[in-house]
Amino acid sequence: MSGIDTSEAEEIIRWSLAKYDDAIMTTGLNLSGTVLLDIASKAGFTGKLIFVDTGYHFPETLHFWQDLEAKYDCVSFVKLSPKTETGFLFETDPVKCCQINKIAPLDEYLSITKPSALINARTRESARGRFGLHLVEDGSPAHINPLVSFSRLDLEEYAKTNHLKVHPLYVSGFLSMGCWPCTKAVRPGDDQRSGRFFGQGRTECGLWGTLGSQ
Ligand code: SF4
């Protein structure tokens, strides 16, 4: 039983499943994604959970994906991979590296499957550029953000109360998980996504902009 009120999140998930019967979920295996998966499965989500395996994830991330897959067997786990190997491109052209390894596999998947809605775990608090997020963002596909008003403390409380296993690197300060060459632990008080793409002048890979949400 969660100590925080998840009724709005559950309600918007049920609403979206009724309105968009082909809705899919995307995840980066962060704390918010772990919480969303739990709430969504309880709200009746049995669709596809999409994760892009760039080839540069921490081993802990890939093991965590397997742990979740074993636990939530009512959900269909889909792992996407890039078509080409890019070696050390993250050193010379990280934007292009993200385009090839993160954005292109998801773009291709969406262009083939054409889901009418994406349910995702973004929160307003997680980054400055996400302050304006809404619960529902119309578009093609529509973006459903059930956790938009959750704080990090809310997420931690939900995970604790519901005995969720979280990404093993979270407790070491990896508040937002990404590829090992471009992700580091953050210091207390820093923006949650400040450990992403460090030294590159960005905190987003461009995925959400490409998908037409922000
Ligand atoms: S986060 Fe880094 S390693 Fe991962 S796809 Fe982007 S540039 Fe490449």
Image (cartoon, grey):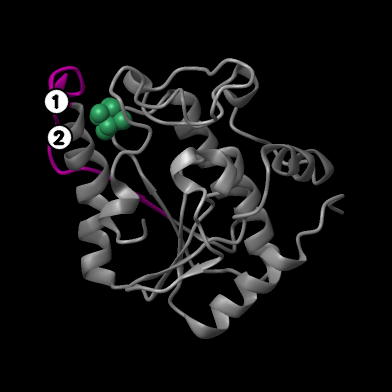
- Which quarter of the frame holds ligand 1? top left
Please name the residue that numbered disc 1 is placed on: 93
Q: Position of residue 149 (x, y in %)?
A: 65, 53
Work out whether 32 lies above or below 181: below
Q: Residue at x 34, y 52 (%)?
A: 208
Q: Would residue 163 be found to the left or right of residue 155 on screen?
A: right
Q: Secondary structure at mark 2?
A: helix
Q: Position of residue 94 (x, y in %)?
A: 20, 27
Please name the residue that numbered disc 2 is placed on: 96
Work out whether 18 lies above or below 183: below
Work out whether 95 lies above or below 68: above
Q: Amino acid at mark 1?
A: Asp
Q: Position of residue 51 (x, y in %)?
A: 40, 48
First to last magenta residue range? 78-93
Image quadrant where one finds the C terminus:
bottom left
Badge 1: few (under 14), some or many (20 or more) residues near its Cα, within 10 Å?
few
Q: Position of residue 125 (x, y in %)?
A: 59, 42
Q: Would residue 183 be found to the left or right of residue 39 on screen?
A: left
Q: Residue at x 56, y 69 (%)?
A: 46
Separation of disc 2 and disc 1 at Cα? 5 Å
Q: Secondary structure at mark 1?
A: loop
Ligand 1 near label 1 (Cβ, under 8 Å)? no
Image quadrant where one finds the N terminus:
bottom right
Nearer to me, 152 or 169: 152
Residue 80 seen in the figure: no
Name the image quarter holding residue 172.
Answer: top right
Q: Is 37 inside the magenta-drawn segment?
A: no
Q: Amino acid at mark 2?
A: Lys
Residue 145 seen in the figure: yes
